[in-house]
Structure formats: structure tokens, C-alpha cells
């Protein structure tokens, strides 16, 4: 009886510990906890978000990785999300050299995922015929 009770307490303690550890392996980034960014480029990217008229750092994303960029815990009048759960300003991804790589206009909402891919080459325009 004592062994069963100890095992039950151990399982409860383990469940509480895991619940407080943030994202678990295989958890879908951005679906329930904020906006996820899927960086499908070979560049590490730094993120900034325009919120309430000023720019704020929003972390970064490693190459070929998906990360939570803006957590839902930043909701509300002083956070990156409005009370509707969506951004009200642009989110910009920069290379480590500070060059703008990609931009997403609002809204991005809790549960959304922004996919950033390598730019595709476009064919050069032909000069006009004389």
C-alpha cells in the first residue's frame, strides 16, 4: 500500500514537472502557444516586431528549424498581440548582418505559423524593343 502511494505521488510530481517544462518533443510550435516561425533557409534569422509604434526584438530562429517566435504570454495592451490575439504591426526577419530578409504584414495570430523560404530567382525582364 505504501509503495503504491509513493508511486502515485512520484507520477503526479513527474506530470507537474513536465507540464512546467515548456514545449515537449513533438509539440506543434505556434498552434496553441503563440506564433511559430518555420525557417526553411540556410540563414539564422533574428526577428523584430512592430508593436504599439515601436520595434521590439522577438528572438531568432536557427536555419532549417521551427521555433516559437512570439509567445501568447505577450498578449494584451502592452504585449505584441492585441486583445484579439493578433499582431498589429509587421514582423521582420533579419540576417545576422542586419539585412532584412523577409517581412510579414499584420495580422499574425496565436496559432499561426510564418514560413520563411529562400527567395526564388525571377527571370530578367527583356529590354523594350526599339
Image: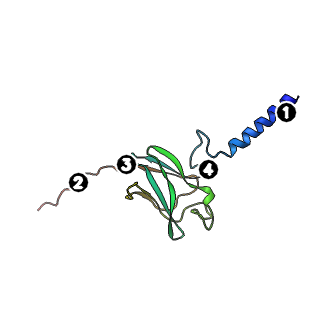
> How far is disc 1 from disc 2 in space, using C-alphas?
73 Å
Please report whichever mark, 3 or 4, sits nearer to the chain's N-terminal start: 4
Q: Position of residue 20 (x, y in %)?
A: 68, 46
User: Is 91 in front, or is 48?
Assistant: 48
> Measuring 61% from the left and 60% from the top, which residue is drawn there?
74
Percent of width and height locating residue 94? 41, 57
Q: Quarter of the image for the N terminus: give it.
A: top right
Quadrant where the C terminus lies? Answer: bottom left
Front of the two marks 2 and 4: 4
The Cα atoms of the two marked residues, 2 and 4, are separated by 42 Å
Q: Mark 1 highlights which residue?
A: 5
First in residue order: circle 1 vs circle 2: 1
Q: CA distance from mark 4 to mark 1?
A: 34 Å
Q: In this rendering, which labeled residue sits more in front, label 2 or label 3?
A: 3
Mark carried by residue 124: 2
Residue at image point 52% right, 48% down = 67
**Disc on the earlier residue, 2 or 4:** 4
Q: CA distance from mark 2 to mark 3?
A: 18 Å
Where residue 25 sits in the image (x, y, percent)?
59, 39
In this view of the protein, which residue sits in the foreground, 124 or 22? 22
How far apart marks 1 and 3 lie (CA) works out to: 55 Å
Residue sitting at the far right: 1
**Residue that badge 3 annotates:** 118
Q: Who comes first in sequence, dot 4 or dot 1?
A: 1
Sequence-earlier tag: 1 or 3: 1
Q: Which mark is residue 32?
A: 4
Q: Is 124 on the left-hand or right-hand side of 46? A: left
The secondary structure type at the circle numbered 3 is loop
Mark 3, other Cα within 10 Å: few <14 / some 14–19 / many ≥20: few
Amino acid at each position: 500500500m505504501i509503495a503504491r502511494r509513493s508511486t502515485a505521488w512520484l507520477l503526479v510530481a513527474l506530470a507537474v514537472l513536465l507540464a512546467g517544462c515548456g514545449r515537449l518533443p513533438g509539440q506543434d510550435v505556434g498552434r496553441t502557444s503563440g506564433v511559430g516561425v518555420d525557417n526553411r533557409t540556410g540563414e539564422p534569422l533574428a526577428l523584430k516586431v512592430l508593436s504599439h509604434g515601436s520595434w521590439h526584438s522577438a528572438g531568432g530562429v536557427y536555419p532549417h528549424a521551427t521555433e516559437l517566435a512570439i509567445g501568447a504570454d505577450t498578449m494584451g495592451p502592452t504585449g505584441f498581440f492585441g486583445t484579439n490575439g493578433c499582431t498589429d504591426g509587421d514582423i521582420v526577419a533579419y540576417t545576422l548582418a542586419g539585412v532584412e530578409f523577409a517581412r510579414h504584414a499584420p495580422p499574425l495570430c496565436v496559432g499561426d505559423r510564418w514560413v520563411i523560404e529562400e527567395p526564388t530567382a525571377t527571370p530578367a525582364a527583356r529590354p523594350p524593343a526599339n
